[in-house]
Image (cartoon, helix red, strand yellow):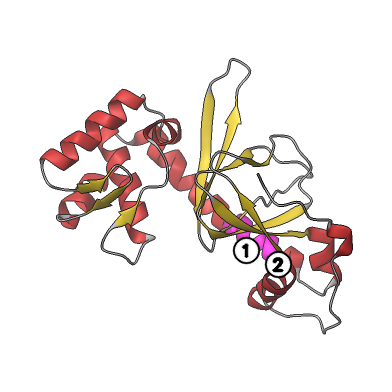
Amino acid sequence: MSLAYDFQDATIPSRSEPSSVDETLGILNRMGVRIAYAKDEEIYGQDEMADLVYRVIEGAVRTSRLMSDGRRQIGDFYRAGDLFGFETGSHHRFAAEALQDCIILVLKRSALKSAGGDLERLTWATTNRELDRAQEHLLLLGRKTASEKVASFLLDLVRGSDADTVDLPMGRQDMADYLGLTIETVSRMLSQLQATRIVCFTATRKFQTPNIAALKRMAA
């Protein structure tokens, strides 16, 4: 269960208006409330009001949207340091859930703005990054083969990690729903990568890349 918090009690420090996104993030880090979410717990729902700012401190988050027939599309995954939940409209198009036990920094958009935060600039910068990620996702879904999709996905995780062993916080079904594949295809592609020693799974949710050059060639 997440920790309850009354945002009306947040005190807003007096300070001059920041001139950069970094300064605005500094306000978020100082004023934001850390909330613990359990694995698979909803952070916000599909079509809910988008009146909060979120940043991952520990763990990982997925965004997803359910279609009327029950099918699910994964929008994206967010790891430590990532901002998420920014919308150009007033409501969330996707829901957000914790992929694992995680800590999320949360602050009302109005509180951030009242404290002198440059919310518009932060929203613009975050939206630009989201657009870049959406375009890469569109290319991945529309033009890549199953093996290229899985290789690209793992390579993205490798690039986002500075450790020799990379965490895989999402399950096979999450990967399938993100890549537009079946869970059987994802499992088969992962088995092939391991059999050829392009990747090596040291645990169900951890892997290494003994042949990163081959993984890059497959993803290209």
Query: Viewed as shown, does residue 215 lie left or right of 181?
Result: left
Q: Is residue 151 above or below residue 192?
A: below
Residue 69 sits inside the magenta stretch: no
**Depth check, front residue: 127 or 65:** 65
Question: At 67% across and 76% down in the image, what residue appears?
Answer: 26
Q: Is residue 211 above or below residue 18?
A: above
Q: Secondary structure at mark 1?
A: helix
Magenta segment: 121-128
- Amino acid at pointer 1: Ala
Query: Viewed as shown, does residue 125 lie left or right of 149?
Result: right
Q: Residue furthest left?
A: 196
Residue 17 at x, y percent in the picture: 80, 80
- Amino acid at pointer 2: Arg
Residue 170 at x, y percent in the picture: 42, 42
The quadrant of the picture occupied by the N terminus is: top right
Residue 34 at x, y percent in the picture: 67, 61
Q: Secondary structure at mark 2?
A: helix
Residue 11 at x, y percent in the picture: 86, 71
Query: Viewed as shown, does residue 3 lie left or right of 127?
Result: right
Q: Which residue is mark 2?
A: 121
Q: Main secondary structure of the magenta part?
A: helix
Which of the labelled discs sits on residue 125, or is there none?
Answer: 1
Question: At 88% across and 63% down in the image, what residue appears?
Answer: 9
Do the residues bearing badges 1 and 2 touch, measured as CB atoms within 8 Å?
yes
